[in-house]
Amino acid sequence: MHLRVINPNTTRAMTDLIGRSARVVAAPGTLVDAVQPTMGPASIESHYEEALAVPGLLEQIALGEAEGVDAYVVACFGDPGVDAARELARGPVIGIAQAAMHAASLVGRRFAVVTTLGRTTGRARELVDRYGFRDACVAVRACEVPVLAIDGARARLVDECRRAVQQDGADAVVLGCAGMAELCAVVGDEVGVPVVDGVAAGTVLAQSLVALGLRPAATGEYAPPPAKQMTGLLAGFEIRADAPVAVA
């Protein structure tokens, strides 16, 4: 099985971290590669940056389809471009927020999301609602640390997770950033409840869907997009009738 983990930002150190975290939980015989776009923001901390990250993400999906990749994990907690990626990919495409929330709901009745900056909490709450976890999610908290600085702020992350348990009544915590992946075990030891990293959860879920033979629907909303001309900077993403996916 070939699993591709896509970091939608362009920071190589974060891509490498995500790849390490995915390989820890990958099944024997699963090839995991971690990639990043050739264009886009260095980190994703605003709606603007999230929107500009999507073309680069779709570029990597198109390349993966040409290489025969079996499944993808989109390693950004905003789950940017996941619906579009499912229109292009033959195999499963898993967003780490959706995977992490499902995992948390299986090990606790009430979970909290702890993310990076306060300005990103609105997007996290939107996803909580979309994925059907409004009743289960008791809080969305921010530790007010930028994405690319999270490794040096583990104490602040632990403190915010502890508040989610003690003040909000969470009995599980979802880490709201792919850059937090390698801190999951440390945070779990400190706060004493299950702590879920979406990169690991997404990797295991993607493998499971491939093993079950499940893939995005070929009809309806996730059917391949219609052939259509693209112009300007997006000309390379044109959908042609004789090609199954966009060629970036």
Image: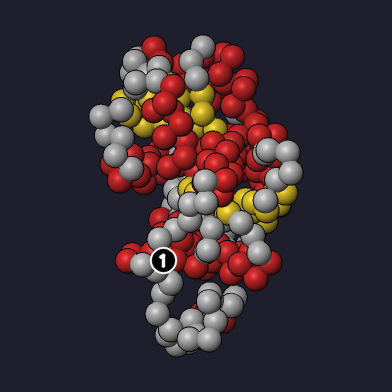
Q: Which residue is drawn at 66% across and 64% down?
A: 68
Q: Which residue is drawn at 39% across and 28% down?
A: 105
Q: Is residue 92 visible?
A: yes
- Please provide percent x and percent y for residue 165: 41, 16
Left or right relative to 118: residue 9? right
- Please provide percent x and percent y for residue 156: 54, 24
Q: Is mark 1 on a helix, strand or loop?
A: loop
Residue holding disc 1: 218
- Please provide percent x and percent y for residue 93: 51, 54
Left or right relative to 134: residue 42? right
The quarter of the picture where residue 220 lies is bottom left
Tell me how the rendering is colored. secondary structure
In the displayed structure, 210 sits above or below 111; it is below
In the displayed structure, 196 sits above or below 147; it is above
The quarter of the picture where residue 58 lies is bottom right
The quarter of the picture where residue 132 lies is top left
- Please provide percent x and percent y for residue 24: 70, 34
